[in-house]
Amino acid sequence: MSGPKDAVGETMGETLLAVDGVSLGFGGVKAITDVSFDIRKGEIRAIIGPNGAGKTSMLNVINGFYHPQQGRITYKGQTRSRMRPYQAASQGIARTFQNVALFRGMSTLDNIMVGRTLRMHRGLFWQMLRFGPAMREEIDHRRHVEDIIDFLQIEAIRKTPVGKLPYGLQKRVELGRALAMEPELLLLDEPMAGMNMEEKEDMCRYILDLNRHFGTTIALIEHDIGVVMDLSDRVVVLEYGHKIADGTPEEVKADPKVIDAYLGVGH
Amino acid sequence: MFYRETGQFKQNYAADSAVFPILQDRYGLAIIMVIAFVAIPMFGSEFLLASVMIPFLILSLGAIGLNILVGYTGLLSLGTAGFMGVGAYAAYKLSTMFPQVNILVWILCSGFFAAGIGVIFGLPSLRIKGFYLAVATLAAQFFLQWCFVRVAWLYNYNPSGAIEVPGRTLFGIAITGPMATPVNRYYVVLGVVVVMTLIASNIVHGRIGRTWMAVRDMDIAAQLMGIRLLPAKLLAFAVSSFYCGVAGALMVFLWLGAAEPSAFDIKLSFLLLFMVIIGGLGSLIGSFMGAALIHILPIFIRALPESLGLPVAAATVEHLTYLIVGALIIFFLIVEPHGLARLWQITKQKLRVWPFPY
Ligand SMILES: Nc1ncnc2c1ncn2[C@@H]1O[C@H](COP(=O)(O)OP(=O)(O)OP(=O)(O)O)[C@@H](O)[C@H]1O
Ligand SMILES: [Mg+2]
């Protein structure tokens, strides 16, 4: 799985997103303390760490759900003290959640169609008619969504309400919904948690395909160390909200602090 | 056996994105339309038109309005009757101030007034949800009803405090006031309700409808897709209140003929909420089913003993009606908490695979 990856690794250059000295607390609880790292265009960047290390909080800072008390976020050359969800979405940051956050009452197709919202522009008047330009727009986006459905091999559940789907498929639909935004930066929060071996392999393949063929930059939180080592170009390790290591999978794996804090304990 | 989609292949996404992609559904709809537009006006008695169909259609329209808010966007509202009242009083004021303009124009325009008021009372929805929002809309209900009683300008300083519908015509035919026949009123109501239902169906099946449902199902994820919550919720309030406003105006002008402020009290709000929940949250067909169950069914039950020649006292019939309808509501809610529309969907699914169980 890691064969062609190494060759791509060298060609990545400019920084897409940089987090600089970010600290985040909830009342007394410090979730993140002075963490800095960057994500380069075209790479797969893993964020790992034990439970409660602040990984999910970090993604929430990046797409604007949490506002850090300190630090700056630079995305596409623009520096801000905090993001807003709408800004993040409209500038190409998409995201999946650790505990699936699908629109449960809607079908697979509609869920993914929601991902196209920002790219659909026909207003209330045309929507009322569902005719002419509105219908053409609907069909154009439907076509795009169908490509995603093909890619993820979920044709059979197109019209099924997502609440009825098994967990593994829900994760897949959620990925599809994020992809519908045609993101430049895709944040995946434990996309393989709770999956069986086969589902995990599929998911790995999708992630690699996305990265290779569409050049999507991916930030990935994952507990399965094997997967992380195979997929990612660089890894950042968090523990109790602090960054304790940052580098290629080989470097991180050899780092004594990481072995102590994470590999030694968890596995 | 008859309800099968086998052999109906969609050649393009336009056909598959249609509101009714299955052929039998389209036939069914056509049959209903023929019954509504031809059979009922031709063979229906005055009683059927004036006391069954007109109220049923108007209540259905109000239920659709409420369903947009509660069922599609997940915002609980108890102010429905208030918003309907805004529509009714707006139509009344406009038609008495500018009698030369056609009444139908004013009835539709009254929706905009209701929409505006709806947006104002929808503002708190950014911060509060569920029961708290219900309480905020309840405040709207009480405030608006207070206005209908206290602001004499709204009812043109009538000593009775009620609004009397003036006689108005459409293409020379009386459609409001005492001269209007039930058939004429029925056609106007039917036309408005059919067109507005079609529009509602278009909205909820497109981008805006998906936006609302996304906000309803998971507002955090919706924000992540670039949906801004406040505009989405306010649009839902506006569209919903528009529908309620038009329903309110129709109610006074084409059903009741006159109305006191008490016509728009909290009981009506609850009645519509009832219809929406029993019919099915997030379903337009359900809105009609709910209105039918709550408005038409009691009429039939009431008429039953007499038509069968059973000697039952009127008061007893009344009590029995309440009892039976109440029991039915509870029965339906236990069988299918998601409403009649879901029950209908399940039945169709069963028909599709008949005679096999799945
Ligand atoms: N909204 C919140 N309010 C209060 N505390 C929070 C909130 N979100 C996160 N925390 C706290 O911040 C810390 C980091 O949580 P976070 O969810 O980021 O961990 P994580 O690395 O994603 O863990 P896991 O592997 O279990 O998903 C935890 O101690 C958590 O309790
Ligand atoms: Mg987490």
Image (tube, grey):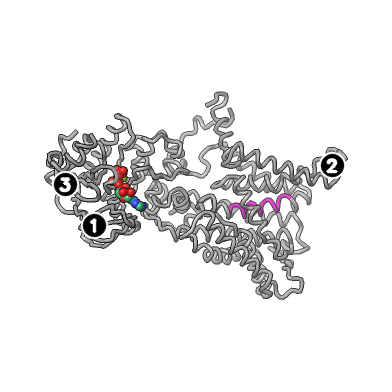
Q: Would you place residue B109 above or below residue B52 in this image? A: below
Q: Quadrant of the N terminus of chain B?
A: top right
Q: Is residue B8 visible?
A: yes
Q: Which residue is mark 1?
A: A22
Q: Is residue B55 magenta?
A: yes
Q: Which residue is mark 2?
A: B306
Q: Is residue A131 visible?
A: no
In the rendered image, residue B318, in percent from the top left (x then y), is placed at 79, 47
Q: Are marks 3 and 1 on the same chain?
A: yes
The front one of B122 and B43 is B122
Q: Taking B133 as reference, is B93 left or right?
A: right
Magenta segment: B52-65
Q: Is residue B39 magenta?
A: no
Q: Which residue is mark 3?
A: A245
Disc 1 marks which amino acid? Answer: Val
Give the spatial CA distance, label 1 vs label 2.
78 Å
- Marks 1 and 2 in Cβ contact (< 8 Å): no
